[in-house]
Amino acid sequence: MADLELIYHDYRNKVMGYIRARVRRYADAEDLCADVFEKIQRKLDEFDAAKASMNTWIFTITRNTVIDYFRRGKPSEELDENLSDETEVDEGLLRTETLSELAGALRALPDEMRDIVVLRYYDGKPLTEIAEMMGLSYGAVKLRHQSALVRLRKLMHV
Amino acid sequence: MDNFLKSLFDYQMFEEQKDLQSVIDSVHARYTMKELTADDLGYVAAAGAPESFRKDKKQER
């Protein structure tokens, strides 16, 4: 069985980094981080390396903990639509190699398309706001967004 | 494709894969978009200099 102290040492920064990217109040982020490691401790016996890597397992626990936080209702903050629990996560894709492939595919896009994809999916910005940020019309951004998705699908063989 | 990208970028926030992060950072560098959090604002005086504060916060990461 993996040692909890070692897991905490290896994953604390990743867990806290993810939570801080989602939750603005530092005190809440610290509480959630503690919740995550409490859950890890409680469920460690259930961890099955044949089903998922430790990394993916801890990511899933962290993600679900953040979703629960927003579900409990935080009037000052809204759940990023990219984090919706309605978004099916194919855990098989959650590998650093896939992230590296995505980086390569993004580099192959024209600058404007790359910007739209990052602002839309990493930062969770709506296309209207992206259009404003980029000084383009909504129609132009919508068109480039669609073209970017088509190109990425081809580049990543999805 | 939409959900695929949502999932990967969400995972990136946890994994912080270096290659992808450099692509993201290069996009962010073109847009001044970091919003100050409520906690951040606690450190900024009313007549303070938010720009220098942002740089400091970035260097910490």
Image (cartoon, rainbow, N blue to C red):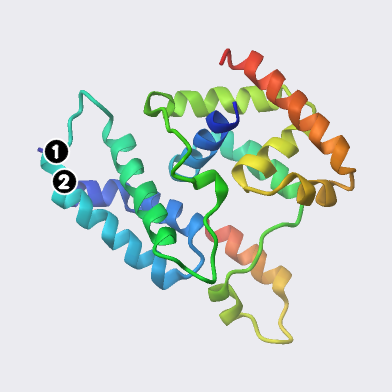
Q: Is residue A47 above or below residue B54?
A: above
Q: Check if mark 2's residue and mark 1's residue have beta carbons within 8 Å.
A: yes
Residue A90 appearing in the image:
yes
How far across and how far down the image is residue A149, in percent? 69, 25
Residue A101 falls in image quadrant: top right
Query: Could you tell me which quadrant the C terminus of chain A lies in?
Result: top right
The chain that hosts pointer 2 is: A
Could you classify mark 2 by the number of other residues whose Cα lies within 10 Å: few (under 14), some (14-19), or many (20 or more)? few
Instruction: Quickly name the residue at label 1.
Output: A46
The chain carrying label 1 is: A
Look at the numbered disc 1 and give the secondary structure of its residue.
helix
Instruction: Indicate the quadrant where residue B44 lies.
Output: bottom right
Q: What's the residue at 87%, 36% (across, down)?
A: A140
Point out residue A96 in the picture as x, y percentages from the top left corner: 44, 29
In this image, B25 relative to A34: left or right?
Answer: right
In the rendered image, residue A151, in percent from the top left (x then y), is placed at 71, 19
- Disc 1 residue type (three-letter): Glu
Left or right: B8, with A153 as reference point? left
Query: Could you tell me which residue is drawn at 69 percent across and 36 percent down?
Result: A117
Residue at 58% of width from left, 64% of height from top?
A: B57
Residue nearer the viewer, A85 or A131: A85
Quadrant of the snapshot with the N terminus of chain A: top left
A93 relative to A32, above or below: above
Whole-percent x and y of residue A150? 70, 20
Name the kind of residue labelled 2 in the image.
Lys
Q: In this figure, which residue is indicated by the disc labeled 2? A: A43
Q: Nearer the viewer, residue A16 or B56?
A: A16
